[in-house]
Amino acid sequence: MASIGLDAPRSAITRTNGWSIDSETITGAACLAVTLIIGIATAGDYATTVDEFNTDDYGPKALAWYTSGFTDRSHFETVEFSLWYYGPWFQMLTAFVQSLWIADALTVRHTMTFLVGLAGLAALLPIARFSVGRWAGPAALMLCVTTGYLYGSLFFTPIDVPFLATMCWAILAIVLMARQGVPRWGATICAGLATGLAIATRTGGIITHCFLIGTMLLSGVEALVLSGRAARPQLRAIAVRVTAAIAISWATAVALWPWLQIGNPFTQFTIAFVHFATLPVDFEFQHWGEGLLTNALPWSYIPEQWFARLPAVFLGLLVLATLFALGKVLWLGRVSVERFKKQGAPGLRRPALVVARSRRILLVWMAVVAPVGFLMIQHATLYDGVRHTLFVIPMLALLGGWGLTRLLPYLRRFSVLAAAFAGMYVVVAITNLATLHPLEYIATNAFAGGVAGSYGRFELDYWAAGATEALRRLERRLDAAGVFAHSSPSLLICIPYREHMVKPMLHRNWRIELDPRKADFVIESERSRCAADVEQLVLVDEVTRYQRAFAWIYANKGSRFIEVACPRCAAQQPNPIRAGNRIFP
């Protein structure tokens, strides 16, 4: 029976015994190189986000646990509650690099987060080559780096981006295990290390065990179909390697996660897992213009968020991939029924073999369906867009890339038109990212109305990234007037629960003020409008994208810096009136 298309394309299967330099590899490497150069060059532009304040505190204290010989317990006792329920390996690595003083601490953090995230995306190239087809890798990579929601998040999402990277590495390692009927020991060890690193990043990494076991079960099915009872030695060898990979995984997790080291590791893990599975977070936010509660989300929340935040071309390729897959599954089902009618149970051996040999691309589908399905069934508490499922987007991109490769034979008839459309898509996507920079993660697609049309209907700048952009703008304005040469103005930055921690954001000698009535300047963010009722404040400036404001700079009319910051403000009416999504001084 011919391949049903759920497994890797024939060209990929015949060349998986080695890695050759070809046009697909060059294209993927070029995309990575360009992204790397742009990312490093612009890392200093990105904002300080809500979770970076506490991870910057967690990293050095977690590192001290090891350097003190496991006696310094500050990261269990003096950091924000529940941080120890996350594995700190990336935060420790970042703290170490920050200690080298290569650049300011925030630029180092943003660069490190970006580098780890890009390294995770780089795994898409070999995953594609060994599963869905070689050209699907560069296509998936391009989809990822032109998706503003993902690309912008690569710089300042300090827990979800490392988790994305480890999940990509874990899936790659499992794909390598699945290349042979009986996995090689090198691939087995890599799978153990990678899945352990995923667990040691976030408790959700435990799902990699499901991926591993499910994929290896299909390897066992292949052995049984081909050899019958004679496959027992192969089945034992597969079982031994799966057991070894899981053992290595837990040894890695325990070694890298202090929380697992202070008690029974499985009990400690369960405590952390249950905490996040029943997260007691309850607040309202906008989703497609409707107010939702974080702990009472509809089952369709994640797909609906993707429908708004992924580019239209990305979504179109996902629809194609789904249709192609459904067509092949229906075809296989029809053939299986026909063979069963003619030959009985023995007639199902060949369809079972086809499915078993499709295990690598089925792993990619599993990496999309399983975690999202679990969250939908569980009705998990989710917030901040879909950053908790950021790790699924690269796998979605792989499926989109697979859909494109299945479409290529038809596009060859219109190669010039297809190339022009692809070029236009890239140009438009990059132009949009440049317009939004450094707030790329607020991007939405045309179905959601773009940034302008989705403003007020979604939580866009939930990280309060616009506040840092506003701060830099205000600092430049006061620098031009020489204010900081002889004065220290007071400032309040409205970032939820972090107003007293904003010192790392400041590039000048500000005085931090927590009372908006006393501050010389106040910067509001989309998520925290803490100066709404202060009458003596007047609007100085605002950070806008597509004519929508994401941060607001106010000056205190009684401040001695009012005329320096805004000469017109002395005559301006205080307490600007907010009307809908616009502000009228």
Image (cartoon, rainbow, N blue to C red):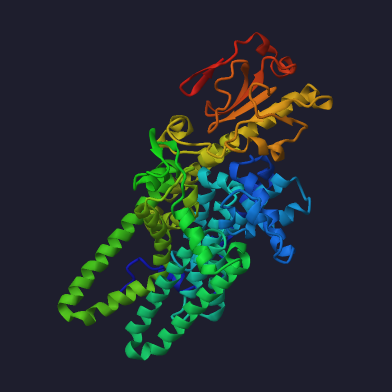
Foreground residue among 547 and 567? 567
Q: Quadrant of the N terminus?
A: bottom left
Q: Is residue 510 above or below residue 92?
A: above
Foreground residue among 332 and 438? 438
Q: Quadrant of the C terminus?
A: top right
Q: Is residue 145 above or below residue 447?
A: below
| Left or right for 297, reference 420 | left
| Left or right for 260, reference 130 | right
Q: Residue furthest bottom?
A: 230
Q: Residue at x 28, y 64 (%)?
A: 329
Q: Residue at x 69, y 45 (%)?
A: 106
| Left or right for 424, reference 438 | left
Is residue 134 in sight in this rendering? no
Q: Is residue 483 above or below residue 411?
A: above
Rendered location of residue 192, percent (x, y): 54, 72
Q: Residue at x 63, y 60 (%)?
A: 89
